[in-house]
């Protein structure tokens, strides 16, 4: 899938390779992600071997197989907000089997809240312009429901 954000997690302590993806698909990993997981795995293994890393063996990383983490908020309809999902996944995933990140299927309000907090942070040099554009947009749509 082009222009789709996912998170690859290498848990070196547990020898696990996770893929965090909000898009629900029954297709094989190779058919969804192409060679990306293999390239990432080989790059990390090469890095560990070339730096003589003793705690985590590159050979062990090279043998890991990716597993797509099952999440109740995965869906087949929302591919536009994958970046928001990826950011939330990075913020909250700790490798726990009972992982809760606060997202639900078709949770428009949560996506809007996360986007708002990212766009309007003071460190975002565009935050004033974004806020101004949002206000103008809301005024132009006065009385219309924008988030279901």
Image (cartoon, helix red, strand yellow):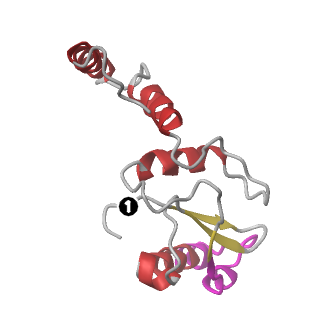
- Magenta residues span 46-66
Q: Which corner quadrant of the image does residue 138 belong to?
A: top left
So how many labels did they put on this image?
1
Q: Which corner quadrant of the image does residue 11 belong to?
A: bottom right
Residue at 70%, 78% in the rendered image = 57
Left or right? Give the position of 9 relative to 132: right
Where residue 92 sits in the image (x, y, percent)?
66, 45
Badge 1 element: loop
Q: Work out whether residue 132 or residue 10 is closer to the camera in this orientation and state it.
A: 132
Is the residue marked by circle 1 packed among few (<14), some (14-19), or many (20+) residues within 10 Å? some
**Image quadrant where one finds the N terminus:** bottom left
Residue at 58%, 50% in the rendered image = 89
Q: Is residue 11 above or below residue 112?
A: below
Residue at 43%, 27% in the rendered image = 116
- Magenta stretch holds residue 20: no
**Image quadrant where one finds the C terminus:** top left
Q: Which corner quadrant of the image does residue 72 belong to?
A: bottom right
Which residue corresponds to mark 1?
Answer: 4
Where residue 4 sits in the image (x, y, percent)?
38, 61
Q: Work out whether residue 38 or residue 107 is closer to the camera in this orientation and state it.
A: 107
Where residue 52 sits in the image (x, y, percent)?
64, 75
* Whether residue 35 is visible: no
- Magenta stretch holds residue 50: yes
């Amino acid at each position: 899938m082009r222009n789709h954000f996912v998170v690859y997690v290498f848990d070196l302590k547990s020898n696990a390779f996770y893929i965090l993806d909000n898009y629900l698909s029954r297709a094989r990993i190779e058919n969804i992600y192409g060679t990306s997981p293999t390239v990432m795995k080989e790059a990390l293994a090469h890095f560990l071997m070339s730096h003589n890393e003793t705690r985590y063996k590159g050979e062990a990383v090279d043998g890991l197989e990716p597993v797509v983490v099952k999440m109740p908020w995965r869906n087949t309809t929302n591919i536009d907000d994958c970046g928001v999902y990826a950011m939330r996944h990075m913020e909250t995933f700790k490798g726990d089997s009972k992982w809760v990140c606060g997202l639900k299927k078709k949770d428009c309000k949560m996506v809007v809240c996360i986007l708002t907090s990212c766009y309007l942070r003071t460190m975002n040099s565009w935050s004033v312009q974004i806020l101004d554009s949002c206000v103008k947009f809301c005024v132009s749509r006065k009385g219309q429901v924008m988030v279901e």
